[in-house]
Image (cartoon, helix red, strand yellow):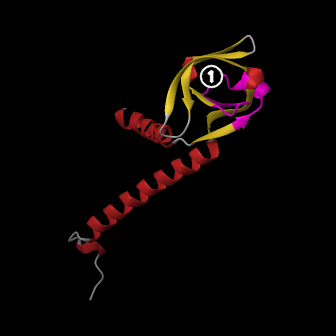
Amino acid sequence: MKAYLSAILVPCLLYFFTGCYTHTAVSKEEFINEYSGHPLQVLTTNHNVYSFEPKNYVVKDDSIRGSGYQVFSEQMKVPFNGIIALSDVEIFNVKKTDGSKSLLTFLGVTAGIFVLIFLIAWISFSDSDMEIFRMPN
């Protein structure tokens, strides 16, 4: 029973840890209808960039309310707690899973593991002293 559970759990964990995410710009309507629970980065009309984690913001009354960071550079982020009007947002950038990249990465890692296991088994088997598989001289 444990072997069957492991056979299911190991690929699921590989997929979870190798899942590829991508930042995608979406329209205001797409963001409100589909992506309001995803990590969010917005660019406002005055060229400020704000970043929010999923449970740290809500979209309510044509505005984004929450706490996150105002991003000046990769190294410089200032805590932000406030309201941004949706009309002031130029770009909604959401982070979502890229299924095709995740699947290709998962298959590549799995194939690599199988090849490694095969090579280890082949090397250890070829070093053994089994007379059955030796070629006659």
Rate crowding at label 1 as few (under 14), some (14 to 19) or many (20 or more) other CA atoms within 10 Å.
Answer: some
Q: Give the residue at x 68% y 38%.
A: 24
Rendered image quadrant of residue 13: top left
Question: In the image, residue 9 lies at what x, y percent?
Answer: 43, 35
Q: Secondary structure at mark 1?
A: loop
Residue 93 locus on image (x, y percent): 67, 34
Residue 58 visible in rendering = yes
Left or right: 60, with 130 as reference point: right
Closer to the camera in the image, 30 or 44: 44
Which residue in the protein does label 1 denote?
Answer: 37
Q: Height in image: 64 above or below 110? A: above
Identity of the residue furthest to the bottom in this view: 137
| Placement of 26 over or under 85, stated as above or below | below
As rendered, which of 109 and 41 lies closer to the eye?
41
Question: In the image, what residue occupies the spot 74% across and 21% down?
Answer: 86
Quarter of the figure that contains the N terminus: top left
Q: Is residue 43 magenta?
A: yes
Tell which residue pokes out farthest to the left in this image: 129
Horizontal and vertical percent position of residue 133 = 30, 74
Residue 73 lies, with reference to residue 79, above or below; the image says below
Residue 18 shown left or right of residue 89 in the figure = left
The residue sitting at the top extreme is 61
Q: Which residue is at a point 63% across and 46% down the rendered structure image? A: 100
Q: What residue range appears in magenta?
A: 25-48
Report the side of 134 relative to 53 (left or right).
Answer: left
Residue at coordinates 52% horizontally, 47% vertically from top-left? 106
Q: Let me know if residue 120 is in the magenta part.
A: no
- Which quadrant does the C terminus fall into? bottom left
